[in-house]
Amino acid sequence: MVEETGRHRYEDVADTLAAQIEAGTWGAGARLPGVRKLAAQFGVSVSTVVAAEHLLENQGLIEARPRSGYYVREYSGQAPEAPDPSPPASQPTAVAGQPLVLQVVQAANEPGLVRLGAAVPHGDFLPARGLQRAFSGVGRNWGDRALAYAFPPGPLELRQQIARRMADAGCQLGPEEIVVTNGAQEAIALSLRAVAEPGDVIAIESPTFYGLLQAIEAQGLRALEIPTDPDTGVSPDALALALDQWPVAAALLMPNFGNPLGHCADEDRKRALVELLEQRNVPLIEDDVYGDLAFTQPRPWAAKAWESAGGVLYCGSFSKTLSPGLRVGWAVPGRFHDRLEYLKYAYSHASPAWPGFAVADFLARGGYDRYLRRACGDLARAVDRVRRAVARYFPAGTRSTRPQGGFVIWVELPEGVDAIQLYRRALAEHISIAPGPLFSPTRRFQRCIRLNCAQPWHARMEWALQRLGQLATDLRAGTH
């Protein structure tokens, strides 16, 4: 369990050793010093070192060898190469036919399943105890307000805390500019309704999060896929070419650690994207739900930090950091504020007050940044473990992304491996993955899958990745 305050000493020892392993101080196959030597180096007891080694073993970083001690685990070959940027789309297309998405999402709640499909962080990465304390104090601190409707724009206390947090993303704004929503998905849906009409064209990353495609589909819009680099995101030149060819009503992008690629645009690229869209008078809907989950600090600025005309509709959420079940999100819709605020009332009336006040209390107490540093370190190691397992177990020619934030990776499999078939075979063995065609309105990426890395590392997790690699190998060879 990750906590925003308080840690065990063995966790500090494990973190230091893990950092040394990742930095190459202890290379693959190297033997760690004995427990007594480590205890002396860290100034702790032998039992503390033993607990730290058990934690590192559970995380897949070291392994015990009989009568020999602990060794850094080896993995075959180098980390996989990143996939190539996606090709441009020929034309806008309607989004339809995604019944498989619901199956992937529902699988996240099935007992006994290894949950590599839906991008839902395991509770071990979340501050459950701190949130429990915040929830228990809501009635005492806010009384009847916690039982009433939280009409748009939402509780002032929560909007004040969000405004303070957004300063870290380069956005200096007041609480009056924020509209609280039921998660980022509602913020995105309302933003689309605020700027587009049925039949309009929305420029998107390729691949992109299937939830964004569903929001586009639900409103009768058409999607135009823009070439996207696995490291740096959408190219301004490619977006400009699309704007020249098609009547784009809005761009819907994830500049910071986009899902599923994990890409992060640098400041120059974000500025160029915003300036291009402002020149063409095309709104940008920015999904920044992973922005706080950068593996290195400071967290990257939002694209909204470079706007000058109020044309960026920023969408955020605490679903990936505090808890998916909170459903506390927000929009900063710029010049579309009044329109989006009315739509929020028209479509869902209000947001749940109790979770909103609990999040406001959690943020006001401080410690969120300390919690994030701990959680982001854990997520960085989790992503690295999964990438190493892909390198070790998947067939030759497999590629995977190398995100610097978030907790998903995109895996491109060799020729002959169909992602839908792999999904079905894996599910039959109680392993859930997200097949690539879900992330494209034109059903591209037939050889790609997305993996959720925010899961505790244990023997069953490693078995699942090893089994996935074998299933992919079998498909490539044409065996059943």
Image (cartoon, rainbow, N blue to C red):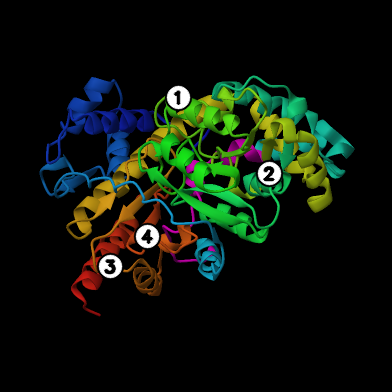
Residue at far front of view: 245
Mark 1 vs mark 2: which is more N-terminal? 2
Q: For numbered disc 3, what is the local secondary structure?
A: loop
The residue indicated by pointer 3 is 417
Contact (Cβ within 8 Å) of mark 3 with mark 1: no
Q: Looking at the image, which residue is at 26% across and 61% down?
A: 466
Distance from label 4 to label 2 (Cα)? Answer: 27 Å
Q: Is residue 332 above or below residue 473?
A: above
How far across and down, in percent of the image, does residue 340 sit? 76, 41
Mark whose residue sits in front, 2 or 3: 2
- Residues 157 and 210: in front is 210
- Residues 340 and 70: in front is 340
**Could you classify mark 3 by the number of other residues whose Cα lies within 10 Å: few (under 14), some (14-19), or many (20 or more)?**
many
Mark 3 vs mark 1: which is more N-terminal? 1
Amino acid, disc 1: Glu
Magenta-drawn segment: 109-132
Q: Which mark is residue 191?
A: 2
Q: Is residue 220 visible?
A: yes
Q: Is residue 393 magenta?
A: no
The residue indicated by pointer 1 is 267
Q: Is residue 192 above or below residue 412?
A: above
Contact (Cβ within 8 Å) of mark 4 with mark 2: no
Distance from label 2 to label 3 (Cα)? Answer: 37 Å
Which quadrant would the C terminus be assigned to in this image? bottom left
